[in-house]
Amino acid sequence: MALKIGTKAPDFSLKGTAGLELNLHQDLAGKTFILYFYPKDFTPGCTAEACEFRDQFEAFRNLDVPVYGISRDNLETHEKFKKAHRLPFELLSDESGKVCKAYDALIPLIKMPKRITYLIDSELKIVGVFQDMFESKAHIQSMLNQIQK
């Protein structure tokens, strides 16, 4: 079960691609943004989801809504994935799984991230959620619909 709408987004600091070190509360307060959690780089569903975010990226940029992908893959794998698929957004590495767990995006027994996408507003509250492990491309349309409400 994903975190509920209206919940304050749990704070975290994670390293990301392109040398990024992102602290949610320091770097993103005052902005609306998307965090999407996904199981693993280079798998079919995760690749389809990332490429759909890439293909729709201009719409998010026009709405001034940054996109951040989070999985337990390391930065080296993230960099390869980002380069291979020309992803214009940042990928954050949560190797420990602590952030995935804080966002209720971790499958307990196998410790693999679930596929959950959160829309977080400028006050750092969750205002949109989409969770579906198998409909990877639907996450993007759901977020665009929720942003444009």
Image (cartoon, rainbow, N blue to C red):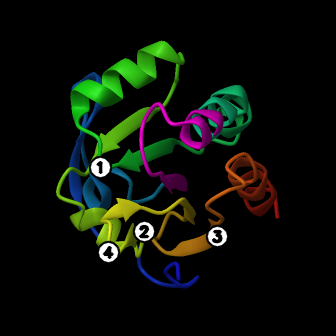
Q: Earlier in the sequence, mark 3 or mark 4?
A: 4
Residue 79, image quadrant: top left
**Amino acid carrying mark 4 in the image:** Leu
Q: Earlier in the sequence, mark 3 or mark 2?
A: 2
* Residue under numbered circle 1: 72
Residue 41 placed where, x, y %? 42, 36
**Amino acid carrying mark 1 in the image:** Arg
- Give the number of the disc on residue 128: 3
Label 3 Cα neighbours within 10 Å, binned few <14 / some 14-19 / many ≥20:
many
Residue 14 placed where, x, y %? 22, 49
**From the viewer's perspective, is residue 59 above or below residue 7?**
above
* Residue under numbered circle 4: 109
Query: Are the residues at dot 4 and dot 2 in contact (C-beta closer than 8 Å)?
Result: no
Label 1 Cα neighbours within 10 Å, binned few <14 / some 14-19 / many ≥20:
many
Gap in angstroms between the C-alphas marked 1 and 2? 11 Å
Residue 54, image quadrant: top right
* Residue under numbered circle 2: 105
Per the image, label 2 sits on a secondary structure element best described as loop
Label 4 Cα neighbours within 10 Å, binned few <14 / some 14-19 / many ≥20:
few
Residue 142, image quadrant: bottom right
Gap in angstroms between the C-alphas marked 3 and 4? 27 Å
> Mark 3, mark 4: which one is toward the viewer?
4
> Mark 4, mark 2: which one is toward the viewer?
4
**Amino acid carrying mark 3 in the image:** Gly
- Residue 149 visible: yes
Most extreme residue toward the left, as rendered? 96
Q: Within the magenta stretch, is there residue 21?
A: no
Stretch of the chain drawn in magenta: 32-48
The residue at 54%/85% (across/down) is 4
Q: In which quadrant of the rendered image does the C terminus lie?
A: bottom right
